[in-house]
Amino acid sequence: MDDWKAIEAICRRGWDAPNEVDLERASWFVEDPQSIRRDVWTAAAYGEGLAVRRLLAADPALATQPGGPWNWTPILYASFSAAHELVGRGDAVIEVVAALLEYGASSADAYEVEPGRFSALYGALAVNGHLDRARLLVAAGAPGSDGQSLYSAVESFNIDHLDLLGRAGLDPEDVSYCLLHAIDMLWDTGVSWLLNHGAATTATHSIADETCLHWAIKRAAGVQTIELLLDHGADPNAKTKDGRAALLPLLGTTPLDYALRLGRPDIVEILESRGAIRREATPEEAFIYAAAAGDEDEIQDLTSDDPDLMAKLPAEDRGLVPFLAHQGALPGVTLLCELGFDVNTTSWMGLTALHWAALRGDDEMTRTLLVYGAVMVDVGGYFGTPMDCTAHAWWQGDHAAVADLLAFAPYAGAEEDPATLPQEPAPGPAAADPEPSSMPRREPPRSDDMLAAAFDPTDDPRAGEDEDPTEEALRAFLAHQQPVALKVGEPPSKDCAVPAGGEELAVPQETD
């Protein structure tokens, strides 16, 4: 049979080729029972237990026979099936899995494609979130470490998924690797579980010899995660291979270096209380540490001693605005913007500071970035625009307030394709012959006077509501900015400057 539309309507695939099931169409096939009982692969996908047993009794070899649209074995179709979401079929697919196992199907079966191996357990647990089906596979011997399931379980925020995989048996290297992903997800409960199940805090990343403590700081982890890692033996004085981070342009040797450079005084305090040793900083490092902390007085002192200090900063440090926005370090972002650092430069996975503020639901950060000239950029793919990010992010925060601000935000010009935005930080401006006692500073391009002048209560849809006057002015000013068509994605209409959102987002994941 070459018509597999019934299976395609009911079976999901892994992240190698993600697809959407069509439950309405699948229901039509259910109304025609013969169409879903005529072969073992379709019957398995629809939870047709009696039909599966009849076919297996006639030919037991069918239990392990590949076939169907993706040349899978029947147990894979049963495991990746969404039949449990059809009315009256909640347990049916479990019965099919049991029948297939009785006839010799392997609980460890998987399909293999570039870029990996996708097991029946992964289909049941990660793709469908069906614990009972997954328990049956584990009881039959499916291993917990299959290259996919543990990593995906971290994204479920469901401790029952981790417990099940733990009972199935996990490779210690997988546990240590997935600790980094739990840190990515800012899931303290998952971090604790993995640490208690053998994750090694001494393991290092293959690229830069970063430890999980380095990783946690650059991924904006909270103090609870930092303390958990330290409690389980993380070394506060561990060093990277060559003084830089893995996978992004961030300088630093020790976890303390990262915390200082990323504007995290809360983590600096914890690390130093646990024995972290602060090494003597170079003038350039001292400048960045002070700027990240929002310490204007220290910046004043440093630039009085060396007026050209900003011009001497390495390229990595000149692109810190989005990294500080990721951390929620508002004082540092504000000071860097005042000093003229690029507010629209990109960071991890190509995201701008405005994307990170939106993901965090950080309305104060969003407002500050807009004041200093941040624009809406559509990076496409998983994240899209900052509006997409705030609409679908799971991070806690005031996403409604962020959306209100972004609704009037200007877009990057059509000639500014996101790919052309500076990937490498542009050189920071140096003051021309500054007075010895003056701190180089750029006035915000939209000053309070400009905002007040732009504000016309008759044009503000929120006129008459109690609102902070500065916020009213900012909103009105942004309302007068003419959005232009985007190079990437659908251009905004005249009535709405915000493109439609995408799928629900998780925390940025990039641990490879």
Image: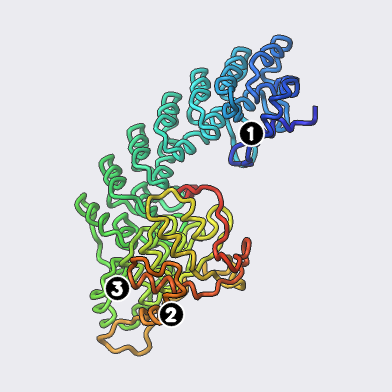
Q: Name the residue under label 3.
A: 283
- Disc 3 marks a residue whose amino acid type is Pro
Seen as rendered, the residue at the extreme right is 1
Question: Residue 143: which disc?
Answer: none
Q: In which quarter of the image is residue 335?
A: bottom left
Mark 2 vs mark 3, CA separation in Å:
41 Å
- Disc 2 marks a residue whose amino acid type is Ala
How dense is the environment of label 3, judged by Cα within 10 Å: few (below 14), some, or many (20 and up)? some
How many numbered marks does the figure carry? 3
One can see residue 195 in this view = yes
- Disc 1 marks a residue whose amino acid type is Leu
Report the side of 283 relative to 18 (left or right): left
Q: Quadrant of residue 203?
A: top left
Image depth: mark 2 or mark 3 in front: 2
9 or 494, nearer to the observer: 494
Image depth: mark 1 or mark 2 in front: 2
Seen as rendered, the residue at the extreme left is 273
Mark 1 vs mark 3, CA separation in Å:
62 Å
First of labels 2, 3 by sequence position: 3
First of labels 1, 2 by sequence position: 1
Q: Position of residue 244 (x, y in %)?
A: 40, 59
One can see residue 311 in this view = no
Quick check: 63 above or below 461?
A: above
Q: Name the residue under label 1.
A: 23
Q: Where is residue 449 in the image (x, y as percent from the top left)?
A: 36, 82
Tell me the element at label 1. Answer: helix
Image depth: mark 1 or mark 3 in front: 1
- Tell me the residue at 36%/40% (across/down): 191
Quick check: 246 above or below 185?
A: below
